[in-house]
């Protein structure tokens, strides 16, 4: 069997309804750059970068937990990631997919790569918070961030499978998506893993690994990812996990978010899960400096402070209860909508 490389374009691939081979795609890219809107120019730029003779490509990290950085990645790793996604989600040549993400980050780039590697028929629309607003087309596969999914609930009747990633999904959105007719998955991944390496159906607790991925933990119980077809070296994450079996793990939280309050280690994400049914606005818990405890656990809620402070902590254990509640009118975010926890905590 011939190896699929980045120079391949599947003969069933279509872009906005038109069959295009590699040369025609490059011509289309020039037109997108010359005449397209800003989001179309970025698609054109990526296509020309992809089909040049350089076996590597530069990826921009999102900057969620550290300064954004450029990560040099082999195009073959991206091809291998696309093939693994196709296997896991049972995508077939001729399936129709919607592209509604910015091309700047890995999630957007990978939707394009999956399409010409797997032979999908891809339609693109401008990235917006309401990508299915005027849509009447039926799609087999769609990728969105949580805000887009929240605003597309009515349109999911025309979607067979959807993946949601890029930021943590709220419990209320998860509960709504469980009832959707679409098959919805939350994904786990990062720029370093060339998009997702695991996914779980909404409503389920454990992530399941994609093909050709194995996992372990370091001494801090953080996830180590071994995916030789994507990265030569093991990828050591800052994510605290519980490994269920060789194919599944539960995400607990990030080690750099852990609050050490009087010697008690608290995982904010675990506390947030318990509070999610209680608070309608965006929120998070974190630690600020305290002369007695070292760090003091606080709750930060987006919005104006209400007349009556009515957040109940009854569902929390003794040490999980925040010592103070702060209100911030608008959360600072990364470009792709993730809350900048550390910057907000430093401003309090």
Image (cartoon, rainbow, N blue to C red):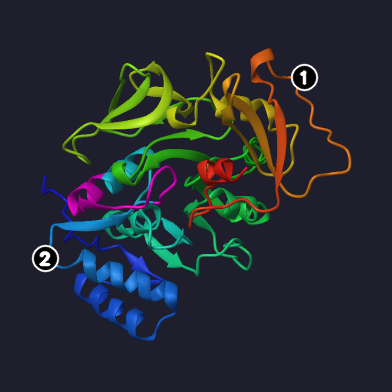
Residue 70 on the magenta span: yes
Q: Is residue 301 left or right of residue 195?
A: right
* Left or right position of 65 against 321: left
Q: Residue placed at 84% from the left, 33% from the top?
A: 310
Is 74 situated above or below 254? below
Say few, some or many: other residues with alpha carbon within 10 Å of mark 1 (under 14 / 14 to 19 / 20 or more): few
Q: Which quadrant of the structure image shows residue 281? A: top right
> Image point 31% across, 52% down: which residue?
69
The picture places residue 272, in percent across and down from the top left corner, at 63, 30
Q: Is residue 212 magenta?
A: no
Relative depth, front residue between 221 and 125? 221
Span of residues in magenta: 62-80
**Residue 153 pos. (x, y %):** 66, 51
Secondary structure of the residue carrying tag 1 is: loop
User: In this figure, which residue is indicated by the disc labeled 2?
Assistant: 53
**Where on the picture, by quarter, is residue 217?**
top left
Pick the quarter of the image with the N terminus.
top left
């Amino acid at each position: 069997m011939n190896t699929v490389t980045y120079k391949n374009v599947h003969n069933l691939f279509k872009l906005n309804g038109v069959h295009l081979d590699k040369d025609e795609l490059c011509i289309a890219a020039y037109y997108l750059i010359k005449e397209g809107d800003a989001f179309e120019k970025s698609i054109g730029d990526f296509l020309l970068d992809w089909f040049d003779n350089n076996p590597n490509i530069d990826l921009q990290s999102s900057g969620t937990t550290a300064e954004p950085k450029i990560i040099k990645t082999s195009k073959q790793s991206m091809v291998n990631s696309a093939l693994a996604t196709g296997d896991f989600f049972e995508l077939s040549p001729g399936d129709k997919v919607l592209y509604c993400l910015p091309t700047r980050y890995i999630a957007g780039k990978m939707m394009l790569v999956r399409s010409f590697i797997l032979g999908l028929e891809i339609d693109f629309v401008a990235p917006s918070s309401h990508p299915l607003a005027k849509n009447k087309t039926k799609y087999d596969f769609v990728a969105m961030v949580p805000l887009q999914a929240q605003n597309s609930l009515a349109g999911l009747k025309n979607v067979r499978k959807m993946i949601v990633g890029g930021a943590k999904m709220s419990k209320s959105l998860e509960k709504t998506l469980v009832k959707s007719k679409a098959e919805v998955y939350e994904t786990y991944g990062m720029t370093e893993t060339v998009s997702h390496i695991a996914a779980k159906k909404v409503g389920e607790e454990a992530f399941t690994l994609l093909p050709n991925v194995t996992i372990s933990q370091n001494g801090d119980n953080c996830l180590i990812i071994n995916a030789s077809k994507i990265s030569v070296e093991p990828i050591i994450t800052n994510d605290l996990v519980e490994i269920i079996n060789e194919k599944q793990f539960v995400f607990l939280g990030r080690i750099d978010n852990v609050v050490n309050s009087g010697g008690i280690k608290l995982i904010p994400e675990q506390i947030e899960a318990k509070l999610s049914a209680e608070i309608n606005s965006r929120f998070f818990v974190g630690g600020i400096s305290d002369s007695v405890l070292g760090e003091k656990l606080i709750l930060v809620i987006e919005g104006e402070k209400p007349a009556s402070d009515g957040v109940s902590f009854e569902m929390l254990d003794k040490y999980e209860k925040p010592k103070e509640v702060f209100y911030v009118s608008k959360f600072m975010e990364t470009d792709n909508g993730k809350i900048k926890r550390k910057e907000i905590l430093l401003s309090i």
